[in-house]
Image (tube, helix red, strand yellow):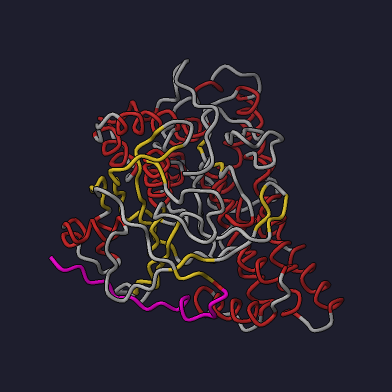
Amino acid sequence: MTLSIRFDNSYARLPDRFFSRQAPEPVRAPRLLALNRPLAEALGLDPEALASPEGVETLAGNRLPEGAEPLAQAYAGHQFGGFVPQLGDGRAILLGEVVAPDGTRHDLQLKGAGRTPYSRMGDGRAWLGPVLREYLVSEAMHALGIPTTRALAAVATGEEVIRETRLPGAVLTRVAASHVRVGTFQYFAVRKDTDALEALARHVMARHYPETETVLDMLGAVLAAQARLVARWMGVGFIHGVMNTDNTSVAGETIDYGPCAFLDGYHPDTVFSSIDQFGRYAYGRQADIAVWNLAQLATSLLPLIDPDRERAIEAATAALHGFPDLFKAAWLDVFRPKIGLGTAEDGDAELIHGLLDLMAAERADFTNTFRDLAEGLSPGRLRDCAGIEAWTGRWQARLDREGTAASAAQTRMRAANPAYIPRNHRVEAAIAAARAGDLAPFERLHRVLAHPFDPQDEARAFRAPPAPGEEVRQTFCGT
């Protein structure tokens, strides 16, 4: 069966210093593990052709489809605050850009496709665990309505990769609005390559922000997109875990699922990354880190904002100073419906933080606390805590002031508060089973997460926090 992909590769038409042309390295014995058929259809791809031997060869990197222009993108980045002037796609190959039937443009990237000029000492490969983890979590984020890269397919390679031990290899086919990062701008800024910065900015404006006319407009649009994105993360208890500038998409999508996780017991200082020893990327610091990253973008853009550096700094600083208000508004837009509010009052942030403070004191389960409120139930571990009765009284008075009946509030809350998230212990159990050759737990979890807001009586066990001994307290970078 012939696989046909409608490519139009705008990034490949940028100057050669933006990337290295690089074909994927073939693998020994590709085998399809998972195929996202609805996404394939949305992209205008034939799922049956993708599942065919030719399609699987393509998804593994063994065969290049007609029109592909494979390349590894160059970028720099601040990693845990330290600047690295050259990073780049060390294990990923961009096959090209797919134009979907609705006219939208999407990168098609193979992650784990072999060495590139940016691999440094790495092997360019991925192992099964992080591939399945990114598949599950990115698709769960999409179902939650949060902008994200997506997973089209996962393919086993029939080869082993060496990490701490020998592990089964895999390749993820990732779909993104683009893979342009803050670090992409930094790459050219540190080289004082103003022509490349200009070309990159025009590419991003045309692709993601066609309503903008100036680079300062584009910066403002990226600021707003990131404010909305991080607020949505916070609303589902998501911790990215490695918010480096090379992991910050200028398109406003969640990208690079490494040591990410969703909160079980709530506390704003929660960290899951094994290497985040000082809490730089803790749940409650994500908005601060977002604006820090965006300040690096603004610095990179200064030559394009105004020829006069002082005027450029003044304009960029004014834009950055608007981020706290953008984030607060986005955060309230997310959290108001989580407690059933449909209007705005000045004291709403204080009311919401009052609940979060009680949750932090009791380490109450983030997802289940909000879902219990949505279902008219006493909120779990807060049931007997000091302060919950007073908070409930303030909450009810607030609902009364806006004239919202209990039934209407619960309807609003059920639409804002998922029952099902990719809990870490469930994801790890699915990966362990897959390593043993059993994909059924992965497939079952994926089906549940595809409908996070819907009652699923047969899947109620998936709502449970980890039992003692099931907790996964750290996750790891890399694939």
Relative to 382, residue 457 above or below: below
* Residue that appears at 65% across and 24% down: 361
Residue furthest to the left in view is 1
Residue furthest to the right in view is 310
Residue 110 in view here = yes
In the rendered image, residue 156, in percent from the top left (x then y), is placed at 29, 45
Relative to 255, residue 267 above or below: above
Q: Is residue 78 magenta?
A: no
- Magenta stretch, main secondary structure, is loop
In the rendered image, residue 175, in percent from the top left (x then y), is placed at 39, 60
Q: Is residue 15 magenta?
A: yes
Left or right? Give the position of 257 relative to 36.
Answer: right
Residue 411 in view here = no
* Residue that appears at 79% across and 74% down: 315
In the rendered image, residue 323, in percent from the top left (x then y), is placed at 70, 60
For the image, the number of numbered tags is 0
38 or 258: nearer the viewer = 258
Magenta residues (range): 1-17
213 or 158: nearer the viewer = 158
18 or 298: nearer the viewer = 18
| Quadrant location, the N terminus | bottom left
* Residue that appears at 45% across and 71% down: 21
Left or right? Give the position of 181 relative to 188.
Answer: left
In the rendered image, residue 362, in percent from the top left (x then y), is placed at 61, 22
